[in-house]
Image: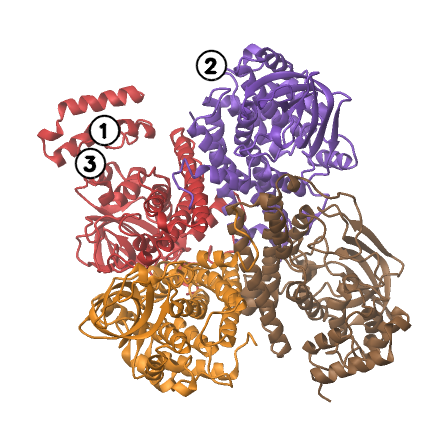
Chain colours: A brown, B red, C orange, D purple
Amino acid sequence: MTWDEASVAERARAFLAEHDPAGMDRLEFLRARFDAGLAWVHFPEGLGGLGAPRDLQAVADRELKGTPDNQPGRIGIGLGMAAPTILAFGTEEQSRRFLRPLWTGEEVWCQLFSEPGAGSDLATLATRAVREGDEWVVDGQKVWTSSAHTARWGILVARTDPGVPKHRGLTYFVCDMHAPGVEVRPLRQITGEAEFNEVFLTGVRLPDALRLGEVGDGWRVAQTTLMNERVAIGGAPARRTMMGVVAETWRSRPELRTHDLHQRLLKLWVDSEVMRLTAARLREQLAAGHPGPEGSGMKLAFARLHQELSGIEVEMLREDGLAYDDWTFRRPDTVDFIGREAGYRYLRAKGNSIEGGTSEILRNIIAERVLGLPAEPRADKDVAWKDLPR
Amino acid sequence: MTWDEASVAERARAFLAEHDPAGMDRLEFLRARFDAGLAWVHFPEGLGGLGAPRDLQAVADRELKGTPDNQPGRIGIGLGMAAPTILAFGTEEQSRRFLRPLWTGEEVWCQLFSEPGAGSDLATLATRAVREGDEWVVDGQKVWTSSAHTARWGILVARTDPGVPKHRGLTYFVCDMHAPGVEVRPLRQITGEAEFNEVFLTGVRLPDALRLGEVGDGWRVAQTTLMNERVAIGGAPARRTMMGVVAETWRSRPELRTHDLHQRLLKLWVDSEVMRLTAARLREQLAAGHPGPEGSGMKLAFARLHQELSGIEVEMLREDGLAYDDWTFRRPDTVDFIGREAGYRYLRAKGNSIEGGTSEILRNIIAERVLGLPAEPRADKDVAWKDLPR
Amino acid sequence: MTLLYTEVEEELRAAVRELLADKCSPSAVLDRADSAAAGGTPYDAELWKALARDIGVAGLLIPEELGGSASREGGASAREAAVVLEELGRAVAPVPFLSSAVLATQALLTAAGQGAGGDLAEELLGRLAAGEATATLAVSFAASPYAPAAPCHENGVTLGEDGTVTGTVTGVIGAEAADVLLVPVRLARKTEPCVGLCAVEASAAVRVTPVPSLDLTRPIATVSFASAPARVVARAEGLEVPWVWEALMRGAGLLASEQLGVAEWCLTTTVAYVKERRQFARPVGSFQAVKHRLADLWLEVVGARAAARNAAALLAEAPAAGPLGDDAAVAVAVAQAHCAAVAVHAAEECVQLHGGIGMTWEHPAHLYLKRAKADQIALGTPGDHRDALAGPADLPTPV
Amino acid sequence: MTLLYTEVEEELRAAVRELLADKCSPSAVLDRADSAAAGGTPYDAELWKALARDIGVAGLLIPEELGGSASREGGASAREAAVVLEELGRAVAPVPFLSSAVLATQALLTAAGQGAGGDLAEELLGRLAAGEATATLAVSFAASPYAPAAPCHENGVTLGEDGTVTGTVTGVIGAEAADVLLVPVRLARKTEPCVGLCAVEASAAVRVTPVPSLDLTRPIATVSFASAPARVVARAEGLEVPWVWEALMRGAGLLASEQLGVAEWCLTTTVAYVKERRQFARPVGSFQAVKHRLADLWLEVVGARAAARNAAALLAEAPAAGPLGDDAAVAVAVAQAHCAAVAVHAAEECVQLHGGIGMTWEHPAHLYLKRAKADQIALGTPGDHRDALAGPADLPTPV
């Protein structure tokens, strides 16, 4: 059948009629919602969806408002990055095994991509995976891994063939974070928190059944993950925005107002509104099935806006801007770019133009893939990875 | 002898005592001033100077204030570019022949460097000079040549050996603008004026005596010219500045004032002041004999400032900004970036980041020569010019 | 409401673009600009006739019952007018669409909505829709929709007892092409300040003096009325001139789409040029600094499209006449504040990245630079529109 | 007057830089910041002693006759203090130079110049010059030199009949390291508003409460006086507190040199990193977009040096006490408006171009980002300094 607003709403109401959240265990309710295809309606039936248009998810969410949710903040990487990749490249078994506990939040996921020596140039990554019979033995170091300490699974890109050019020798795995040889160390950031981790992989044995996609096809699989990440970071409609937070400060502290700040805030208010409209138009395009290239652009705009706004807020606060709420070295479960105080927002926003693809890389992508400008002369395209200059 | 402020002032007063400008022909006065070494005191004796420190020129100028000048606006290219190059690379005969009429303004000079196919990448220029006995036969097309129609001489870079890499096959000449085969056509700009010309060189015969520097050494000679050009454009202390002009509009038209414009103008006033101080510090360094690399930076700052200020002025003028003073296709003798009306200033300023080295090229120069950052991978360094991809 | 383009809109765009490709090449526009600078008419009457009549762009905002194509049920609206303006901007086409089919038309629609003099307004709208006549609103193109004073006071055109108007208006666009001039006037016969909107047919009593203009493809002129016979289209008590403010606000909202078109041409043309132009044995467009600047510019243009579409969509939903709601007013201000700056930035980058050739009269880049800069001033500066947002955004001005 | 560095200044710089290279490595600074965050003292007493006594930086602004090295004839001046601040900024050195040797010292110099209480001021200046004592000015580091209200009113520290002071001051730098606190007070015994500057020796009656601060290497603290014994250094009628304004203005002018030092470290460190760091089999610093950004940043730093030197030179020429002339005031405002922004921009580019590593606590980049951002607020924001220029620049504020 083809789904529309009415039929999805109908199905959601029917589901609620049979499952009273008040009367059942939270997890049972979420599992039932998944099985009813109301988790992500654009996923196939049997995998938490109905094969319906993506934009009808809003209808299901509206109908199920107020019922227990899967705490998306805790499992953002699973929802935003692992799930679409598993759906696109996973086997039937893999999808059935992983998607349900991923969505219900029973199993947290993390991302094992970046390495100290491979940031923007991810494809040079050095973590090796060597095949031994039905297993792969993985050795290497990953970094910038959020939730690694709470994660059950990790999406991992490793080098399975150093003898071919860097993009061709990679393979994509699901890493068992409970396997022997997986060591997680917190990595403290300039905010004082350790939102991320370093992950050391030493002789970690992964069954071949945890491979996602073909051997040597890891780069293509990873692209799917990264595209989804950027849309997730830049594209989502925000309830509470950085502009809203800063405007609140402006309204509540008349004594801090100057024409200098006012003119700059008005400009940024316009920029925020333009970004909101651009994101709305992007979502319309996605819903209409022809995704525009605006995705990577949104993350660019988002980072610039967060950085300028949070910078103005600290400046505006004067003496209060000289203070910082808390330098304690802790490990937050969830991340809120606009949470805590102005100083935190300012420092945390600096990461927005680095994490998930630096703004420099995003500009390259736009220039080459959207505008069709020629690539830089490349020295590393056709050289075997092991022979690259280091 | 070593010159100081007192002795230069003394010499200037002595010169004036012997030469009463009121009592003699303007040109005679200028020739006498040149012969007295008071034209450019840092030039050697006999060539219009005293071999004195450059900064003592201010003393001579002060003493001779109010006497006939050489209309520097008319002969800027001769003074700013040709003269220092002739001094550095010319033979004794060439210096004696050219410098005096150059400085007095009897002979106007122009620059024959850029070509339609060789702008930022000047070294790829295609104008050929082929040796025939004691002469060179020149064929090619030059562009962006100001004063070409009034010029007696041009400084010319031409390719004398296409068989070697582009930088090594060039030779520098003084071009006789009255020679047969030199055709000058005005080139209209977006301002409506034709401040520049296209120059077509067809079988132009130049005696070898007009060669400046060694055969094949043209690139090095041209560098001297270009460095002097950039200092000339960015470094000179200005009586009337773009900031001054725009501030005048602000003061005289209270009804046009808004906080938006006010905040932007205050920022630019600070930028102008910082540029003035940077230029002053640069001149101090030059006078002290250790020139800083600030030179190319000044031209960058100068262009940005002119463009932002002239853009604000047109916006500030509202209905008056919709008008333009005059679109007549004419050929001005002198150029004044801040002359005429706001619309002209806005359009003319667009050229400031292109002429005499684009801002992009200047940033490359700063990054590589000042900061020592690695050059881009180059495909054209060791290839014979004739074999370069086109 | 959608921010995308509908199929109907894309068809309209295709028709306009095809016509412009045929009749409005850059060199043709440049030739006309030259002749205009030499005293010729700045507008292309033949091109305008083809647009207005054959394609019917003159009636996009005029209700079907008056001969136009606007209607609530699937007819045309501000959305279609916006698409036309995108194309006209992309071609810097010298036609009086904005002055006649948007500004003058909006003034008449507001007047018609008011009853008094409605018949005359409807008659005029009919002539405009049919392409029989071209009009303009005799108000300075630099007037801000937020300016407190009524323009008919600034320029002081008065309607005499004898039914003729006298006075001068400066900074008017489209006057050379106008058969009918709509001018806000003061009614002399009243002691009470009372204003009106008059329709004046072009005649010997109406002198249009072209002014050398920054924008070569849409110059301004000074219009002087010397006892010119006039008909009153609408009256109002007090100093309010709703027909003017409504027209300026809606015009500003649609101007954003013209600015989008200008910016798109500049981006596309520059990208194409840097792919071709080689320096240092590489395409200029392969240098990362150039690529990053064009990527940033692209992002600005993407934002401009979203903002311009939003303004057009909300204007399309607003009543044809009468004051705009807050949403529409905010959408107009946001679109102007953003798109005006983007068009100027795109044109400036276009000149810079073309290098020397971009500074020459022969290359069309300067036509776009001049249009973009003039549009930045037109119908309120970006600063005016930002200031207007302080209220709706609840960002109070410092005291 | 010269904008270059004199030989004497270069020798002083070399001595300071050598000491800092030895005693103030980034890791040492980071360790101290950690311990400070954990409640330890934020300042390095040993390093400060070496600077103050062995090199004698504490007395650079104090006249020779009082044991310092300042004099009109070839002695030290604001120029030398500026060079020291460049180096301290380059090392984000945790020493109370700005709070004691600049702000407190300037307040005392102004007081001494005024006669009344001059002896006490001179005695204190002698102790500071000798490095026997360290002081601070108990005024918020965020106070603007242009703020209309006297800070002693905002925080309301009062001097009682019994010669003790009571009250609280927030946002004070250098308090943890201060043996003497100079606090502007209201004199309780007068009905006429009358203010004074008091010297309070650190004691149990003076509570210094560190505040978790954005700037880890120069945190702020809250200072509470509970009937603390105080000596009056100076008095004034009305609400004027010249000692405070003069100190804040001169401090702002010299802070520009610290900002220059911060910006230089960030530029130099980033350039070195992008030369080493390879991605895509090339040094990151060979990518043109990175090169152009660093070229622009270099130009900003060049301008910052010219502006900071100009401010230092004009402060050096100004009388040690008393109101600054227009030239010096303009130089201070220009230097702050420019250098504050350059330091922040340089630190932000430093973090960005280091990529992930720049976001880690282990890398020193964040210490400079936090210092630069705090300095932007300190002693007047760039906006405050720009507004102060409207008069001298004759760019009247819109009404």
Disc 2 residue type (three-letter): Glu
Q: Secondary structure at mark 3?
A: loop
Q: Are marks 2 and 1 on the same chain?
A: no
Q: Position of residue A93 (x, y in %)?
A: 84, 77
Q: Are marks 2 and 3 on the same chain?
A: no
The residue carrying mark 1 is B37
Residue B69, disc? 3
Q: Closest to the observer: C232 or C31?
A: C232
Q: Chain of mark 1?
A: B
* Marks 2/1: CA–CA distance: 38 Å
Image point (46%, 82%), residue name: C76
Q: Position of residue D152 (x, y in %)?
A: 61, 28
Residue D73, disc? 2
Disc 3 residue type (three-letter): Asp
Residue D144 appearing in the image: yes
The tag earlier along the polypeptide, 1 or 3, is 1
Q: Secondary structure at mark 2?
A: loop
Q: Is residue A29 above or below residue B269?
A: below
Quarter holding residue C225: bottom left
Q: Are marks 1 and 3 on the same chain?
A: yes
Q: Chain of mark 3?
A: B
Image point (28%, 26%), residue name: B59
Left/right placement of residue A218 relative to residue A137 reads left
